[in-house]
Image: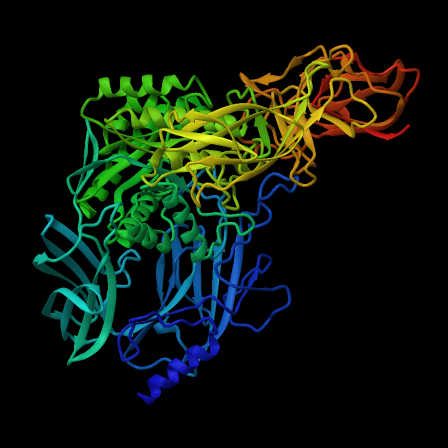
Amino acid sequence: MIRRALLLFALVYCLPDVVLPAGQSTDGGRCQISFNSGWLFSKNEADAALPDRTTAGWQAVQLPHTWNDKDVLADGQRGYYRGVGWYKKRFRLVPEGGRRYFLRFEGVNQTAEVFVNGKPAGEHTGGYTAFNVDLTPFLEASGEQYIAVKADNSHRDDVPPLSADFTFFGGIYRPVHLVTMGEQHFSMSDYGGPGIYIATPRVTPHSADVTIAYHLQNRSDVPQALTLETVIRKDVASALATKATVVTIPASGDTVVTVTCSDVQNFDLWSPDHPAMYYVESLLKQSGKRVDNLSQPLGFRWFRFDPEKGFFINGKNIKLMGANRHQDRIPYGNALSNDMHRQDLRLLKEMGGNFLRNAHYPQADEVLDQADRLGFAVWEEIPLVNEVTVGPQHTENATVMLKEMIKQHYNHPSVVIWAYMNEIYWAHRFKPQEEIAGRNRATLELARHLENVARELDPHRYTAMAMHNYPAYEETGLGDIPMIAGWNLYHGWYYGKYEDFGTFMDEQRRKYPKRIHLISEYGAGSDVRLYSEKPEKFDFTIEEQIRFTRSITTQILDRPYIAGGALWNLIDFSSERRVDATSHINNKGLATADRKPKDAYYLMQALLSEKPVARLGYPFRNRWLHAAASPSDTLVPVRMHAFSNQKSVSLYVDNRLFGEAEVKNGMAEWEMKLAPGKHLLSLAPNSPDTPEKQIEARLIPFRPDGKTPELAMNVGSNYAFIDTRTDLYWLPERMYEKGSWGVVGGEPLYVGGKVGTKEDILAVDEEDPLYQTMRVNPEGFGADLPDGTYEIELLMVDYVKKSRRFADEDKEIAYEPGQRVFGISVNGTSILPEIDLGGSYGLNVPCRLTFRYTVTGNAGLLIKFHPVGGEPVLSAVRIRAVGF
């Protein structure tokens, strides 16, 4: 006991982040402590496997850690570091006879090699599942130990994912644990699983049978007889069932023992509405002394999917509605703390969600733990995304990933679906036509294989794949293989109209009446700086995201045969390749990357929540700026909406009733005309969850006067852009009228049927939306300003002529000289005789032309564009009075 105490003291002394979890043993059983402090990291080290004390060029880091937390942000460059990173650490551990020592890595992306005291101790392929490394054979008796980990997130054709719409962060980005136990223990080499697998083959409201398969290991060289004690608990004070089993494990061998606890009673059923959690406490004893112990989650429930009526749990029909979730956050990359994981799941629960799709990979243990406790039905999948590599090693790696996912998360009652492919035909368009037939055959073969593996490992859950709107799934029969057909559909965003969604799904049901249908993705992007009174497809305004979400969600809710839907995505997430309104980020989140809910989040809360909901919209907006449409226009139009699940809500302006509005599909709307100034808005019925909103209404007169501080207009679009850095308000485009101001001539740019280019505008981080829309071939810009001196800014950019979502093929700036050359004059005075945007600056490289001009003789201001070769373009205009 003295030696044991000394060992624990040494661990605590050298590992200041040590935590002994409640209920874990220090008397011979299992002990797990964190192993996240004291690491050094370097991207430049050629080889750190051998012990050394070098610190030059090494950075002190705390795990979890990724080396891509910064270089995936808008940094003016495409791509991010994908390669090798080394981690090393010295620690003191005096090994004790009869004990085994393991490191458990929850996640290293995407391959890892582990060295202990200079010797190879283990390796792992796949970045999203846990693995264990046995340290015992490599530990030094002196107690001075050295560990090095080589992590590598380089692309490999045999390691999924091959490509995807998310960032492949590198590093030891999930926690690491030091685990000690006796030589006889629950398996630490069963695909990273706990070695304990719990099933409930029979559950009724009043009784259940619980079957536990124990995978046991003996690392001594003689057979061992032990007692296995099984206790099913609600808490430490109550036991629903107990059982003792005598087992013998062969020398240096493994064995599997199945224990059944029949007719267990006095429990509550687990469901999303009532997530009652229980635990199986397992103790392995030798001669009465504990050698290993482990607690695993248990939930009593039964469920099924029906092709006509959707999802049933414990006999109750419920609609599965929620969101997808990626595991990153600015500026931490994917190296999130458990508190951050918990925050995300609380966000989804408070929205009223009961369904979580872990996309597109198995996620942290804490995510599954919280899904159990908060009550989510979970779809979990392996990272087989976009395409497959035809070859045995890719198949083997995908198979191991599936086995690891199922084994590691088997005991979580929240998991109802195992999935193994996402939009696997997406990359077809980029492959040579002569390869397609062979790739289709290989994809079918792999899908059948993975389906069989999943059903063999877990016959109690459903299997699924996520398909996109592409005919090959039907033509090849791939959609017939899984038990559930998941659909990633974006009607009204990338293609078609909102109504096409219902038409598509009804046709699928007609063709495949016995299929189970579930919407695995649907969503629209939004930039919280963009607002429009005339939203349109793919404009990334808050209003368009609301329109899309409202339409598709109600179509899902109206169709009983659709088991449910998962919005894409819970939060804005990193996708370094993306070229949208917010470059390097997929902004289809219901919340921003820093977890601030958008309007669409509150809409979903109104549609899904059972508790009363009434909340004013526009959480990110407090100003309405209006340019008068006529000389007599003195009021500011303000459109306001609220989200509620009541029949109607009343809007109060400055504590006076403005009007009552009927709630339709989760939303009520008002159109007001307010006097310039500040106003207080509130709702009734009111509650602590319905905060008041202070807004400011401002008016720019029809004819700007000397009191007008500035004019700023976003050309070529119907939306306003609010710069969150300075609060500068760029108004939607307006055409020039005599006596007022606006753009003259030209046509708004549409690329691929969508407004603007949505390209990554290089050299700017915050103003992409201003440059992405434009007028092509404008005659000019007129402003009937009073005499005075003005600073004028013209924002212009030449653009990529095709519509694309990703720009990772851009290795350098592209130049197109002579294709867009024009001059600029003001009131007949040449400002710039000739500018060649594509030739001098390059595509997607902005030009912000700033100059001063003095208006005299009551002439006003007329900016003109003079084509020289090709058509001029104009993205935004700002005019600011600087003197008179």
Question: Relative to residue 424, is residue 641 drawn left or right?
Answer: right
- Expressed as whole percent of the image width and height from the top left, the position of residue 506 reads 28, 19
In the displayed structure, 821 sits above or below 661; it is above
From the top left corner, tell me how far across and down residue 155 is, in percent: 48, 43
**Residue at the left extreme?**
263
Q: Which quarter of the figure is the N terminus placed in?
A: bottom left
The front one of 468 and 641 is 641
Q: Is residue 452 left or right of residue 870?
A: left
Q: Nearer the viewer, residue 775 or 727?
A: 727
Residue at 60% x, 71% y: name it.
54
> Which of the 4 image quarters holds residue 131?
bottom left
* Residue 503, visible in the rendered structure: yes
Residue 439 visible at all: no
Comparing 82 with 882, the one in front is: 882
**In this picture, residue 38 sits left or right of residue 7:** right
- Coordinates of residue 429 in the picture (x, y in percent): 44, 24
Q: Quadrant of the C terminus?
A: top right
**311 left or right, relative to 248:** right
The colour scheme of the drawn protein is rainbow
